[in-house]
Image (spheres, grey):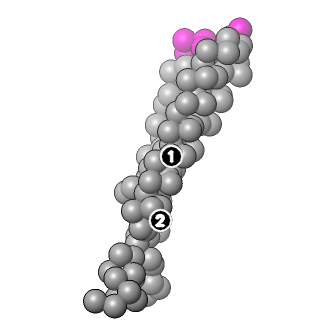
Amino acid sequence: MEEAEVREQAAPVRPTVRGRTARHPSPKEYVRIAVVLGVITALEVAIYYLDLPRGILIPLLFLFSGIKFALVVLWYMHLKFDSRMYSRFFMIGIAGAVTLYLVVLLTFRAFAG
């Protein structure tokens, strides 16, 4: 096989629902996202041990978990490369889950100093 053929097989191009083409991520990109997820997790653990006030700690942890959710859904579940309809379903799901979780936290007064 020629080098160009090997590169094409490593990152195949496939049509999407709207007729556009999307490049499938290479293994190197998956490793890069895994490293980013590991760094974000390390930041979450470090922030937890900084003894920050709960009013700052909880929103920061929410922010980091939202970023991790988006990365996992977009890259590992391939929503970045699929129809936008699937992305909308996940966004509706995460919005509902965050809303429910915030209601529970507010009910138990988790944000009160």
| SS of the residue under disc 1 | helix
Circle 1 residues within 10 Å: few <14, some 14–19, many ≥20: few
| Quarter in which the C terminus is drawn | top right
Which quadrant of the figure contains the N terminus? bottom left
* Magenta-colored span: 106-113
Q: Which numbered dot is residue 80? A: 2
Q: Is residue 98 above or below residue 113?
A: below
**Under tag 2, what secondary structure?**
helix
Which residue is at the far top? 113
Q: Left of 60 or right of it: where is 33?
A: left
Residue located 46% across and 37% down the image = 97
- Residue occupying image coordinates x 55% and y 23%: 45
| Label total for image | 2
Pick whichever, 79 or 105, lies toward us. 79
Q: Position of residue 92 (x, y in %)?
A: 47, 50
Q: Quadrant of residue 111?
A: top right
Q: What is the three-letter code of the residue carrying label 2?
A: Lys
Q: Which residue shows up at 45% across the image and 78% down it?
A: 22
Furthest-front residue in this view:
2
Mark 2 vs mark 1, CA separation in Å: 19 Å
Residue 74 lies, in percent from the top left, at: 47, 58
State which quadrant residue 54 falls in: top right
